[in-house]
Image (tube, rainbow, N blue to C red):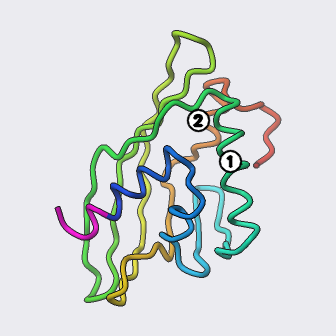
Amino acid sequence: MGKLDRFFARYEEGANTFDTKLISSQYAECFLAGDPNGTVCIRNDAAFHKAIPERRDFFRQIGFKSAKVLGVQETALDERYTMAKLHWEMVFEKEPGQPLEFRFYISYFVFDDGSGPKVVSYISHDDEQKTMRDAGLLPTNGGRR
């Protein structure tokens, strides 16, 4: 298992445990997040650390069960940057016995200066919130969280 495979195995662990220390350790000091609705710059600071358990609580409220990396397609951009397109599956069970599976792709841009990989940017290729709204997990008010 290569360095990036280990990195994304830990990333998957963080997606399931919502471990603030683990998750924040995998991001650069600031990073760019994007989806079909646009982009946002995020600082890896106290506000980001506070948002992780808030996300955990929200996800549990709507029935989060698991997140799993189904596949990783790596493209080395140079000796320090790699683009990795991950195929994800997330499972929610808002109604007992009725699991909902969502599959989507996210491309991560990872920088490694020798001290370990860090996400500097990611792009979700799917509108995950719309998909979850359409499935009844999120309110249909059209607002973004």
User: Which residue range is magenta in the image?
Assistant: 1-6
Observer-nearest residue: 2 or 129? 2
Q: Which mark is residue 55?
A: 1
The residue that mark 2 highlights is 131
Q: Is residue 75 above or below residue 56?
A: below
The residue shown at (67%, 24%) is 136
Q: Secondary structure at mark 2?
A: helix
Q: Quadrant of the N terminus?
A: bottom left
The residue shown at (57%, 43%) is 128
Position in image of residue 5 (x %, y %) = 26, 61
Query: What's the CA distance linking mark 2 and mark 1?
Result: 17 Å
Residue kind at label 2, given as amino acid type = Thr
The residue shown at (67%, 29%) is 62
Left or right relative to 121: residue 144: right
Residue kind at label 1, given as amino acid type = Arg
Position in image of residue 23 (x %, y %) = 53, 62
Q: Secondary structure at mark 1?
A: helix
Q: Is residue 121 magenta?
A: no
Position in image of residue 120 (x %, y %) = 50, 77
